[in-house]
Image (cartoon, helix red, strand yellow):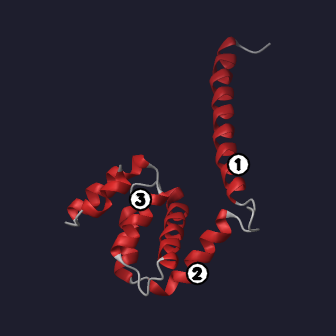
Amino acid sequence: MMPDWIIWVMIPWFLFMIWFFATGGYFMFRKFLKGMPKEDGKSDLDWQDYYIAKTRHLWTEEQKALLEELVQPVPQLFRDAAKRTIAGKIGELAVKEKADRMREDLIIRGYILATPKRDHKWLVETLRRQQIDLQPYRELLE
């Protein structure tokens, strides 16, 4: 027979493991859905990779540094995936607008479109610190 204290340790451990696996499963399922082909035969991840490859030559070191600064609040574990998603959206905007170079406004608009509203607070703080006018982006930030 097990002592009662072991059972009281096992119950929180069991509940923690259920929460841990559910959280992991949720994120894995989201990644799985992003990898599913759409009507055009390509998945969201395929399009993201396409736009990144198509616009890779347009990025300068300064613009890469800006993107790096914008993703700073993202935990290190997820930062590369977030940066890739945001870069894919920026690349999509650049391709649609037939940009011949990567511009600051493309990076900011792409960041706004690729991230949830809760992350926009960091963007606003960063742009104010760099003294970048927020007026052209007010409509997207609302």
State the CA–CA distance, disc 2 to disc 3: 21 Å
The residue sitting at 65% across, 27% down in the picture is 15
- Which quadrant is home to the N terminus? top right
Amino acid, disc 1: Phe
Question: Which comes before the other along the chain, label 3 or label 1?
Answer: 1
Residue hosting label 2: 53
Residue hosting label 1: 29
Task: Examine the rendering and report whether any part of residue 133 can be seen.
Answer: yes
* Helix, strand or loop at mark 1: helix
Q: Is residue 87 positioned above or below 141 on the image?
A: below
Amino acid, disc 2: Ala
Question: Which comes before the other along the chain, label 1 or label 2?
Answer: 1
Side of 81 relative to 3 (left or right) = left
Q: Position of residue 70 (x, y in %)?
A: 37, 63
Residue hosting label 3: 112
* Helix, strand or loop at mark 2: helix
